[in-house]
Image (cartoon, rainbow, N blue to C red):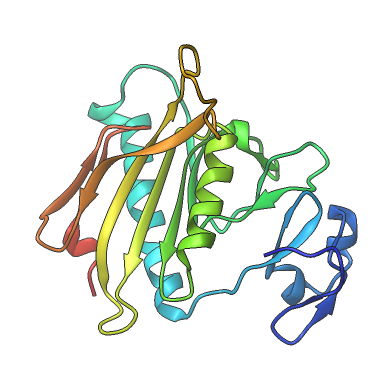
């Protein structure tokens, strides 16, 4: 997936390793297709129109839930403040040498223009289509889990037929206790499937990080 030499992107040739500052010197359309991990360039292909469409629908649904949670009759009294974003870089290191760009996310409220670090994030989500291989999907899930992000969501599109949503899955972070095990686990934290919805579902309901209610009709074409 990653190489220390020059990396061939979609029509571009850039060094295999970059700092955040060097990445910012690239043309905007090139930099927007790159994620970094330990300074290694990872090309991330932007999806077609339908990918952006469903990312926007998830953003809209989560934004509505966040607003309900922070005001009105559904406010939980905790005083927590939430912000919902789309295609926002999530940084895993102070020097920004490792970052991923989920399709949608929920973070605690930060000041205008503030960078988003993993410690600030409660939920990340990806809209999956044919170009998302199982290996890349699992690699990204592992990175989010290692960073301690509590919830991970996936929205799968049936890109081969209808470009509609085939299912939505919610995962919760679980830590693995190594005490008493003869073999040490490869990872200290993994995501566990805790919610799954498909077109037969009338509504998506989930309690965290705030009460989420999404009529399936809001997601379908």
170 or 137, which lies in front?
Answer: 137
As drawn, the residue found furthest toward the bottom would be 11
Q: Can residue 18 be seen by looking at this rendering? A: yes
Q: Count every numbered label the image shows and give the total.
A: 0
Asked if residue 59 lies left or right of residue 95, the reply is: left
110 or 193, which lies in front?
Answer: 193
Relative image position of residue 109 (x, y in whole percent): 55, 33
Asked if residue 198 lies left or right of residue 6, the reply is: left
As drawn, the residue found furthest toward the front would be 182
Asked if residue 219 lies left or right of residue 29, the reply is: left
Q: Can residue 213 be seen by looking at this rendering? A: no
**Going 86% across and 73% down the picture, which residue do you hit?**
6
Relative image position of residue 10 (x, y in whole percent): 69, 83
**Going 45% across and 62% down the picture, which residue do you hit?**
134
Relative image position of residue 41 (x, y in whole percent): 76, 63
159 or 30, which lies in front?
Answer: 159
Q: Quadrant of the N terminus?
A: bottom right
Relative image position of residue 36 (x, y in whole percent): 74, 56
**Going 31% across and 37% down the picture, which residue do you hit?**
68
Q: Quadrant of the C terminus?
A: bottom left
As drawn, the residue found furthest toward the top would be 180
Question: Vertically, is 211 above or below 57?
Answer: above
**Going 48% across and 29% down the picture, which residue do you hit?**
81
């Amino acid at each position: 997936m990653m190489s220390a030499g020059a990396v061939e992107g979609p029509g571009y040739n850039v060094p295999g390793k970059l700092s955040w500052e060097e990445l910012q010197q690239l043309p905007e359309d090139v930099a927007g297709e790159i994620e970094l991990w330990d300074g290694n360039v990872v090309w991330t292909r932007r999806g077609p129109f339908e990918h952006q469409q469903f990312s926007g629908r998830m953003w809209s649904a989560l934004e509505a839930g966040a607003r309900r949670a922070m005001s009105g009759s559904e406010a939980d009294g905790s005083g927590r403040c939430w912000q919902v974003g789309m295609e926002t870089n999530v940084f895993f290191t102070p020097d920004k040498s490792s970052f991923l760009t989920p399709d949608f996310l929920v973070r605690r409220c930060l000041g205008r223009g503030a960078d988003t670090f993993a410690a600030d994030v409660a939920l990340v989500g990806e809209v999956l289509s044919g170009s998302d291989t199982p290996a890349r999907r699992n690699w990204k899930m592992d990175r989010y889990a290692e960073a301690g992000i509590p919830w991970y969501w996936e929205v799968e599109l049936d890109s081969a037929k209808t470009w509609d949503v085939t299912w939505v899955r919610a995962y919760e972070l679980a830590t693995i206790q190594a005490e008493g095990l003869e073999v040490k686990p490869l990872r200290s934290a993994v995501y566990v499937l805790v919610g799954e919805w498909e077109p037969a579902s009338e509504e998506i309901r989930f309690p965290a990080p705030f009460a989420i209610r999404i009529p399936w009709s809001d997601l379908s074409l």
